[in-house]
């Protein structure tokens, strides 16, 4: 990457915003100026970056003047309002909300899968849903070798997907449970400690699927460029702090074996095999947390399909990293490496 870029983070104080800030420093993304944006209640506070305290500014329509890249992680309504304003001001918006994902004019990008889509941007690139990313990073190399025709996913989603407040609610409610104290949940709709429940996104009463499940279906089809993949998802919130896990069953076009899948995934970008049958050691949230690869294991033949075309597996990935901030930073790296940042001053 040559040159340096003026970068803004909208939602800088949130769980994903903090990871954006950390990753920019850790990955040495070339920054000449960094603008941290948040709500009025956070304005004036500071966050540490590269040994310096940077003051947080209130997000406003004028916040994006002279900005080259704006990372958004402040919720869909904020993105819908300020994303187009930032793009109009000349910034490339990399948006972590669902606001633009299904807009046909907005690329939906996972760099391990479709980095070329970045070239189609008109000022906004969408970061996919965390569950979608964690599921399909390991599925893509299989799909390229032996096209996937059907996917059934069951997710075990961490508190981090609902934000820092949900993570705090899980910690506090667990502490109260162990101390036999009453605790009233206010962030999530059900008690969280030692419990799990259907994902807390809006339910479609006609289909019985919630928004998270529908996102996985539509986003996978868009990213793979194949609207004919048959997908069904069941998304569940579990009492884990920050890494999502998923049970995936795929049906391919042709017969496929677990050995073939392991061989494909052994050299796949963004994937780490954790498939120790002898020691019963497979992907776990504790191992996925804090690192960027999607862990894949429990790779086995689906015995319910006598054709030999189906494989079952289990994956885990850090929701705040590859499921959100890391994927966004990787998009920015693709954009600058390929010279796709029109108008950026270097």
Image (cartoon, rainbow, N blue to C red):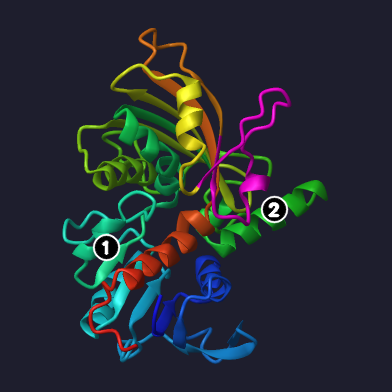
Crowd band around label 2 with a 10 angstrom C-alpha radius: few (<14), some (14–19), many (20+): many
- On the image, numbered disc 1 is attached to which residue? 118
Nearer the observer, 183 or 167? 167
Quarter of the C terminus within the rendering: bottom left
- Location of residue 6 in the rendering, given as x and y in whole percent from the top left corner: 39, 86
Nearer the N terminus, badge 1 or badge 2? Answer: 1
199 vs 179, left or right, is: left
Nearer the observer, 264 or 119? 264
State the image quarter where residue 232 is shown.
top left
Specify start and end residues of the magenta stretch as a single range. 271-296
Q: Residue furthest right?
A: 179
> Is 263 situated above or below 39?
above
Nearer the observer, 229 or 238? 229
> Is 172 situated above or below 233?
below
> Is 127 situated above or below 26?
above
- On the image, numbered disc 2 is attached to which residue? 173
14 vs 335, left or right, is: right
- Location of residue 307 in the rendering, given as x and y in whole percent from the top left corner: 35, 9
- The residue at the point 27 percent across, 76 percent down is 341
For residue 78, say whether it is visible. Answer: no
- The residue at the point 40 percent across, 73 percent down is 71
* Image mark for residue 73: none
In what element is the residue under mark 2? helix
Q: Residue furthest left?
A: 105
Q: Mainly helix, strand or loop, the magenta region?
A: loop
């Amino acid at each position: 990457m040559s040159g340096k870029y003026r970068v803004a983070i909208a939602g800088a104080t949130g769980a994903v915003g903090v990871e954006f800030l950390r990753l920019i420093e850790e990955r040495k993304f070339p920054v000449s100026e960094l603008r941290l944006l948040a709500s009025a209640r956070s304005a004036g506070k500071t966050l540490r970056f590269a040994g310096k305290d940077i003051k947080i500014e209130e997000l406003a329509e004028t916040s994006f003047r002279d900005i080259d890249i704006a990372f958004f992680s402040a919720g869909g309504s904020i993105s819908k309002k300020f994303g187009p304003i930032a793009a109009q001001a000349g910034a490339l918006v990399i948006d972590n909300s669902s606001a633009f994902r299904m807009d046909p004019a907005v690329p939906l990008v996972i760099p391990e899968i479709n980095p070329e889509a970045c070239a189609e941007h008109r000022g906004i690139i969408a970061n996919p849903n965390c569950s979608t990313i964690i599921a399909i990073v390991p599925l893509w190399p299989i799909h390229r070798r032996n096209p996937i025709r059907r996917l059934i996913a069951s997710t075990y989603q961490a508190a981090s997907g609902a934000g820092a407040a949900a993570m705090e609610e899980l910690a506090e409610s667990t502490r109260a449970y162990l101390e036999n104290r009453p605790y009233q949940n206010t962030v999530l709709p059900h008690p969280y400690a030692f419990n799990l429940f259907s994902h807390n996104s809006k339910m479609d009463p006609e289909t019985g699927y919630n928004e998270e499940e529908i996102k996985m279906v539509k986003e996978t089809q868009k990213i793979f460029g194949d609207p004919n993949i048959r997908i069904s998802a069941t998304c569940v919130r579990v009492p884990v702090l920050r890494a999502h896990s998923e049970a995936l069953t795929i049906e391919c076009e042709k017969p496929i074996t677990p050995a073939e899948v392991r061989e494909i995934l052994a050299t796949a970008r963004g994937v780490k095999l954790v498939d120790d049958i002898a020691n019963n050691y497979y992907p776990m949230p504790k191992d996925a947390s804090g690192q960027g690869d999607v862990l894949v294991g429990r790779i086995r033949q689906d015995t319910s399909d006598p054709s030999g075309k189906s494989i079952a597996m289990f994956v885990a990935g850090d929701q705040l990293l590859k499921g959100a901030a890391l994927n966004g930073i990787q998009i920015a790296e693709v954009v600058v490496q390929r010279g796709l940042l029109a108008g950026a001053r270097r």
